[in-house]
Amino acid sequence: MINKLSTGRILSIDAFRGITILVMIFVNSVAGVHGIPSWMQHAHADEDRMTFVDVVFPAFLFIVGMSIPFAINSRLNKGDSFWQLQKHILWRTLGLLVLGVFMVNTDELNPAATGMSMGVWALLFYGSVILVWNVYKFEQPWISWCLKGIGAVILIVLAVIYRGGEDGAHYLTPQWWGILGLIGWAYLYACIIYQLFKGNHNAIFFMIAVCIGYYILCRQPFIQNSEWSLLASQGGNAAHTAIVLCGMLLTLFYFDEDLGLTGSRLVSRVAGFCTVLLIAGAWLRPAYKLSKIQATPSWCLYCAAICVAVFSLLYFLIDVKHFNRWTSFFKPAGSNPLLTYILPDIVYFGMMALGLSLPAVLQEGVPGIIWCMCFAVAMLFVVKGLNKLHIRLQL
């Protein structure tokens, strides 16, 4: 064990994850609605501002950081060796990178050059994802491995036949890693840092500053225009890693029994951490502005501070005051986040393959916003049903 953490499921973390997924489905859906206010859209790259939409992705990163200490210590407690743990971390990272690359390339698919419509190709991709990463309950392990093997073969075939771009000359490439891929890189770096410093909270706080400093260094002209430009390309990943480490540090504040933070000591430590994040973000904003697209330090620090505040409120309500019956609505999505994440895309591409589309009235203004709200809630109910059918994805 690296840290002596509280045992059992932490309802507030599950609720935070479920709420984030619900909001994610809504903002992804509403992005296709015309005539929505600017505060419901991502800020542009050249703007010095952010909206609540720009906090959804960092909230995912933050929750990944909160989960890492529990996940690593759980595997060590079950008897994993050092190398078994590293294999697990690398496999999860690879899975996130592969999924990210496939999802990014889907919208660029050229049906004529690929020999398959975008809707069919995407449905085969998501179907193979379910085959490969589903948690099977068969008594005979060979059935599970056969299904995983079929899914892997389909993924390889889809990658080989893929052609993208208007001229159909582009192959499946990581033009960028996609949301899942970016989470994968940040997850990998955070796991390395957590193990390297043996879960020491002071060292993790220091590494948050190092990650922010690395981003700032990478933005300097003498780095971007030198032979070190490849290292400079990792500046965004460093910024994302800083958010993951903020989540990790909050987990240690709340749940590391060796730290023993309770009562006023816990409140002052968490409040102090949140204040430091806000002050640092405000201090760096004039130089690097507030931008999700550019993953600027101020955006990272402000979003991390928001996540600290939101989780602290949830923890107080759910784990301290035991006002938690309402969390059961979010539990299915919180326990099956990957399936919940890809489910809206499956619906979207399923409609595309069938030649269906939403009525125009649901693609504009207030009716469109209301529809996206209903759709997000419906997806959580669908995931609940899929959970009962033992369809649960795990990287």
Image (tube, rainbow, N blue to C red):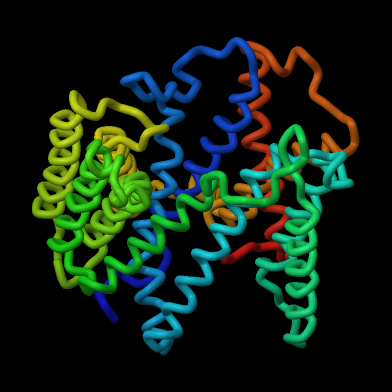
32, 269: nearer the viewer: 32
Residue 367 x, y percent position in the rendering: 67, 14
Snapshot quadrant of residue 289: top left
Residue 377 x, y percent position in the rendering: 63, 36
Q: Residue at horizontal 44%, vertical 47%?
A: 60
Residue 366 x, y percent position in the rendering: 62, 12
Residue 280 x, y percent position in the rendering: 15, 36
Query: Would residue 218 appear left or right of 170 to someone viewing this image?
Result: left
* Residue 351 seen: yes
The C terminus, quarter of image:
bottom right
Q: Residue at horizontal 64%, vertical 14%?
A: 34
Query: Would residue 56 appear left or right of 216 to someone viewing this image?
Result: right
Disc tally is: 0
Q: Residue at horizontal 17%, vertical 32%?
A: 284
The N terminus, quarter of image:
bottom left
119 to 11, vertically: above or below? above
165 to 238, vertically: above or below? above
Q: Residue at horizontal 75%, vertical 32%?
A: 166
395, 20: nearer the viewer: 395
* Residue 322 seen: no
Snapshot quadrant of residue 58: top left
